[in-house]
Image (cartoon, helix red, strand yellow):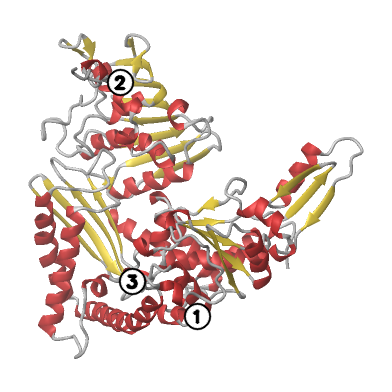
Amino acid sequence: MAKKQSYTGSDITVLEGLDPVRKRPAMYIGGTDKVGYHHLAWEIVDNSIDEVINKHATKVVVTLHKDGKSLTVADNGRGIPVDKIKKYKKSALEVILTTLHAGGKFEAGKNYKHSGGLHGVGASVVNALSSSLIARVKRGGKIYEQQFSRGVAKGKMKSKAGGRGTGTAITFTPDPEIFGSKQSFDAKILINRLEAKSYLHRGVEINFEDEKTGKKVKFLHERGIEEYLEKIVKTRSSRMVPPEAKHYYIKKDGDTSIEICLTWTEAIDEHIQSYVNGVPTPNGGTHANGFKAAVNKAVRNFISTHKLVPKGITLTADDIREGLVAIVSVYVGEPQFQGQTKQRLNNTEVTAHVDNAVRPSLEQFLNENRQQAEAVVARIILAARARAASRAAAQAVSRKTAVSHRLNLPGKLADCSSTNPAISELFIVEGDSAGGSAKQGRDRKTQAILPLRGKVINAEQATLAKLLNNKEINDIISALGCGIGPKLDLSKLRYHKIFLLMDADADGHHIATLLLTFFFRHLRPLIDAGHVYLAQPPLYRVDVGKKTFWALDELERDNILKTEVKGNTKPNITRFKGLGEMNPDVLNKTTLDPKLRNALRIQVGRDEELATELLIGKLMGKDASARYDMITSNSATVSELDI
């Protein structure tokens, strides 16, 4: 008897119109989290910037409305076409906003010589994922308007006389059915991205207005990425080597335009920000690869020509680019991005374009500025010596963190019985007393406890060699098992969740900050992969009748008292002096139990890099004046000081 087919044509689903976008939003915007939410803004902003790139607009205005969830992006460009397309019997405006792969950017050079994207899906994707979108276009002395909801037109396009000039304004609200009701736009993220775009497109005026706070910001940078480089160096709190030395380069070659600004600093890492047609490419790509190759070749040629390398020193590409800060901005006729979110450029021909253009220019600059160039070489040689010195120390650490690491784990580590990293958790705890409570309150199968004694060393000021000689830091590295620095291997990480568990007081916050600085500077891949968390033990216990509440701080305590204390009921308030004062059951219930705890995952978004660098530099750097200014400017707001 023939078996009945269970998979037939009736099982095939065809998603039409913008249904695929709503069904699988991650395919088009990367996800429905905070990054995906803001990606909708970048799609609309990039359309306006495309008008600027192609000399059709000079001004962009972004307005964040009072609800924090709706945004208007307006420009003084040509305005989206509104004439009817016979094939669809609809206006071009409606077709563009309701049809995937519809736009004026497919025929390179015809309407847009350069564009942030050629997929033709940006505006329609935003429309599909918005509960409301209103398009207003000024063209030919008329104002045209059409409203949409979740990718569907709510009526026909309307027009009225009036309106000077030309331009487009898009007002949209991300759909809570897709993104949830709690998400909203972050003004700081919007401002940072818009400011970056104003640097990349010299002479363009970008205005931002936050209707909720009344804040208005205007960005206009005539020197473009030269000013941007100066801002980045200042924000990272790193001096240039030598001071005030930088190299700026611009070249146009057919449809490819290359604009680069670079300098070396005293920082221990390289910082390269790359862009294609004004769109950031955080994962780099062929343009960034061409730039790195050009820098390596130019510097090596200069060093070789002038015989500047001392005997016994081998320079690597990492040595040459240590401390390098650069902005790489290219304009390509037909960019090929990796995915709709455009995080990486794939055009193979761009590598050679950038390499061949930058290398001779940088080499000429080095030869014509011998004093500056020799200071850079001295800095590179210093990096090579430091890397060689730390290599031996790192190898010593790596021997402790080999696969057979259980024999070499720190003696005070109370390890979990599980050997599966995916379900294993490490709690780095402040002090032996707290460690004792945590060991008794933990789940021994999946939770490991590592107590630390006192404050760890400040990683912002210490060298790697000094860090590796610190017992507390060594214990952390040994327990994690994945190594440190450039040779960090995530596949060897023994715990996929790492919690920093400190007292909920000022001293505990300081220790947590020291540890976060260490993780940010030397174990950054753990943060980027989402493995690092900040545990949140309560500072107060509030008993109201038979009910018990836990408060993280004074504000939560006061809110509990306002909302829960009624009539003549007298609450009993307990302030914990430290984790060691909690009994194991309480610590488990409030901080350790995965079902009950409220831990914070440590994340650094792409648009928060500079702000994070600045904050760490102020809090933990060698310059005490920045901390003094921070303390004096905030002293008036401190109502209770924990000493």
Residue bearing mark 1: 470
Label 1 sits on a secondary structure element that is loop
Label 2 sits on a secondary structure element that is strand
Circle 3 Cα neighbour tier, 10 Å, few/some/many (<14 / 14–19 / ≥20): many
Q: CA distance from mark 3 to mark 1?
A: 27 Å
- Residue 625 in the image, given as x and y percentages of width and height: 55, 71
Q: CA distance from mark 1 to mark 2?
A: 65 Å
Residue bearing mark 3: 265
Please, which residue is most extreme toward the right here? Answer: 568
Label 3 sits on a secondary structure element that is loop
- Can you say which quadrant of the picture contains the C terminus? bottom right
Question: Identity of the amino acid at label 1?
Answer: Asn
Residue bearing mark 2: 138
User: Is residue 285 left or right of 464 when viewed as pictured?
Assistant: left
- Residue 512 in the image, given as x and y percentages of width and height: 57, 64
Q: What residue is drawn where x is 41% and y is 60%? A: 526
Q: Earlier in the sequence, mark 3 or mark 1?
A: 3
- Residue 174 in the image, given as x and y percentages of width and height: 43, 29
Residue contact at pointers 1 and 2, CB within 8 angstroms:
no
Residue contact at pointers 3 and 1, CB within 8 angstroms:
no
Question: Identity of the amino acid at label 3?
Answer: Thr
User: Is residue 138 left or right of 505 when viewed as pictured?
Assistant: left
- Residue 37 in the image, given as x and y percentages of width and height: 41, 36
Residue 302 position (above or below residue 100): below
